[in-house]
Image: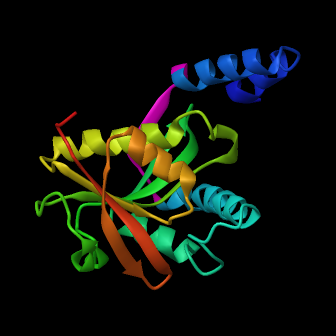
Amino acid sequence: MQNYQRIIFLFSIVTDDSFVMIDKMMVSHSKLQFREANLQDVDRIWEIILQAKAQMFREKKQQWDENYPLPDHITADIEKGFGYVLTQDEVIIAYGAVVFDGEPAYNELEGEWLSGQPYVVVHRLAVADEAKRHGIATQFMQNVINLSVGKGIMSFKVDTNFDNFYMLKIFEKMGFTYCGKILYAQGERMAFEKLLGKK
């Protein structure tokens, strides 16, 4: 049984508030590792993507659908060196495509970016169901910032759907600035930028 499961079992009789506090402590103090994904990770990553899609469907969100993303997108991410995972005790709990090659759709922004410098962008970010609501997506994003700064890339651009309130809240908390709208084949997205090294 994983450490996470053991803690849930041992503390399942405490009050809800106490359980949440203990559970959050477990996540923050467990060994988290941010690393490049490999092809052996695809099945687990796809499982997490399916969990994210199921939540979007339940909540009637419009960002992802049956045709996006697909396993081929994950495999392509990894083969291009874009795929990254966050693991907890060696178990993958989050995935995202971390791209330093630019996003063509960003060239057609309806609005204005904060800067025109090279940037990092994250696509297809998803967190495993058992790790949600513990700041894991924020932790993933912070690791991307650290990676980007280490490469000397000081701009972080992202986009999300207008109804993805979880990501919108993270962007606000992390200091991203709304810059305008972009258009993908899947629809319109809200675009944000954060200049790294600034509070």
- Quarter holding residue 149: top left
Where residue 136 sits in the image (x, y, percent)?
A: 52, 38
Q: Residue at x 15, y 50 (%)?
A: 153
Q: Quadrant of the C terminus?
A: top left
Render colour scheme: rainbow
Task: Give 20 or 114, whichever is nearer the viewer.
Answer: 114
Where residue 67 sits in the image (x, y, percent)?
A: 60, 81
Where residue 100 sits in the image (x, y, percent)?
A: 24, 61
State whether residue 64 appears in this view: yes
| Range of residues picked out in magenta | 29-38
Where residue 190 sits in the image (x, y, percent)?
A: 40, 66
Residue located farthest toward the bottom when viewing the structure as drawn: 185
Residue located farthest toward the right when viewing the structure as drawn: 13
Image position of 10 with respect to 110: above or below? above
Task: Give 193 or 97, whichever is nearer the viewer.
Answer: 193
Image position of 136 with respect to 40: above or below? above
Q: Is residue 161 left or right of residue 152?
A: right
Q: Residue at x 69, y 24 (%)?
A: 3
- Quarter holding residue 98: bottom left
Q: Residue at x 70, y 67 (%)?
A: 60
Image position of 81 with respect to 93: above or below? below
Q: Is residue 62 left or right of residue 192?
A: right
Tell how many labels: 0
